[in-house]
DNA sequence: TTATTTACGCAACGGCCGTAGCGTAAATGG
DNA sequence: CCATTTACGCTACGGCCGTTGCGTAAATAA
């Protein structure tokens, strides 16, 4: 698949690739997204700035590629109890998101703060970065979506419910709080969210034949 | 409340205030958030750039203040039927959000694209901008939240359900699609979302006494 | 070996953000 | 009227992004 291809001229230095991404990783953790400086990343990697721009056309492209590479897998349990599995999964996600926030009530900022928000903005700025971000999340959401499908096959979810919409309700609520309202996302909230999503908010008898 | 106060030195020019915001408004619509240039806004307003920075410490502050001022009210119907009212409200919201997207499949960009994403990023960059953005959305969400509360009083929603969580599910799903996954938000989606939120996804009998 | 192709490092640049210094304008207080 | 205070316009600057041009290095093709 990965054809070595043996192209014509001088090959890209894989050594430089690694050193750049390594330096960028450290710099992102230390400075955060917005104070990340391409010049400094180049200096730390021991490379000319133009070498960075030969690989990624903008800072946004570099950082999205970096995040896509270093994103940690969110574990998905599958105990056969949807409610339990969802709480475990969403708690893990919330933990990761909370770590991304600006915690520093004191002077100390969390340098990884705002990464998600900046990724979202970068996605809106450049169409191809948007593609990359969507692919990043699609990959990330594959397992939890499969979890929902299995639960439906087991009969734990209404047959006429949509896993995609269901996931939007759950993940959407978390990201809405993270990005927009800034309200806290604790274990109690996660439990309440899952309960309410599964049970529904309406009092009308669930109609098995929705139009 | 608004004390004229008659302070000591030369007063701020209200004329400049208006001209700046007017020019900034036009420039934002023409260029979009990221290509909005403070220098150009100053020139268009017929004002020195330093005059802008005396009023707002950064471009983010200016643009958040501008959006807070020009945001259009989302109408909230109240027909006595929650499902219907929610569909109407969320359809209006979705319409506004869709207008914010990058529509240009051709070369033409929607210049108002990405405004929400940039606001979210700006909120993550500056704590005080974060406050302003949260206030903006709190104000915007007041009416729909009241709508949910009234529906609960009418008995259309489970007494033990939380309006805040419910609203997170609805608005969160929309913003998640807008900002993260980029999936389309059409009338069919809105209807499906509202149905699923009201009816719930689980097959277990709704437990009136959730812990 | 030599020509060609592509990558690298280096230096300079224009654009935009945000800041600083300074002379001038417009208000209030004595 | 005069001193004080604050706003304004102007200029210049440093920092960062992204680009350009050019000489040099490392690969392949003939």
Image (tube, coloured by chain):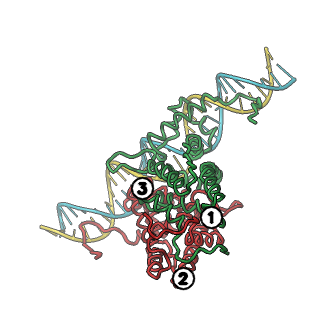
Chain colours: A red, B green, C cyan, D yellow
* B194 vs A49, nearest the viewer: B194
Residue B47 found in image quarter:
top right
* 10 Å crowding of disc 3: few (<14), some (14-19), many (20+): few
Q: Are the residues flagged by discs 3 and 2 in contact, CB closer than 8 Å?
A: no
Q: Are the residues flagged by discs 3 and 1 in contact, CB closer than 8 Å?
A: no
Q: Which one is in front in this view, the residue at disc 2 or the one at disc 1?
A: 2
Whether labels 3 and 1 share one chain: no
- The Cα–Cα distance between marks 3 and 1, rounded to whole angstroms, is 37 Å
Q: Given the image, what chain letter belongs to the residue carrying mark 3?
A: B
Give the residue at mark 3. Answer: B186
In the image: residue C28, left or right of residue B67? right
**Residue A100 percent coordinates (x, y):** 58, 65
* B181 vs B45, nearest the viewer: B181
Give the residue at mark 2. Answer: A81
Q: Which one is in front in this view, the residue at disc 3 or the one at disc 1?
A: 3
**Residue A104 percent coordinates (x, y):** 68, 62
* A203 vs C29, nearest the viewer: A203
At mark 3, the secondary structure is loop
Give the residue at mark 1. Answer: A110
Q: Given the image, what chain letter belongs to the residue carrying mark 2?
A: A
Residue B138 lies, with reference to residue B56, above or below; the image says below
At mark 2, the secondary structure is loop
* 10 Å crowding of disc 2: few (<14), some (14-19), many (20+): few
Name the N-terminal-most of marks 2 and 1: 2
Pick the quarter of the image with the C terminus of chain B.
Answer: bottom right
């Amino acid at each position: 698949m990965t054809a070595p291809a043996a192209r014509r001229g001088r090959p890209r230095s894989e050594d430089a690739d690694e050193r750049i991404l390594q330096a960028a990783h450290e710099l992102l953790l230390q400075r955060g997204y917005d104070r990340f400086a391409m010049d400094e990343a180049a200096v730390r990697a021991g490379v000319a700035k133009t070498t960075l721009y030969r690989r990624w056309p903008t800072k946004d492209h570099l950082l999205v590629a970096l995040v896509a590479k270093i994103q940690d897998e969110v574990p998905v349990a599958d105990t056969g109890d949807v409610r339990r599995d969802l709480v475990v999964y969403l708690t893990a996600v919330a933990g990761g998101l909370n770590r991304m926030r600006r915690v520093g009530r004191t002077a100390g900022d969390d340098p990884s703060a705002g990464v998600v928000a900046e990724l979202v903005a970068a996605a809106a700025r450049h169409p191809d970065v948007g593609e990359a971000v969507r692919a990043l999340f699609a990959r990330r959401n594959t397992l939890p979506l499969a979890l929902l499908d299995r639960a439906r096959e087991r009969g734990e979810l209404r047959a006429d419910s949509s896993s995609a919409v269901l996931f939007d309700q759950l993940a959407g609520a978390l990201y809405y709080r993270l990005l927009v309202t800034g309200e806290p996302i604790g274990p109690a909230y996660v439990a309440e969210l899952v309960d309410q999503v599964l049970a529904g908010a309406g009092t009308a008898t669930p109609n098995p034949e929705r139009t």
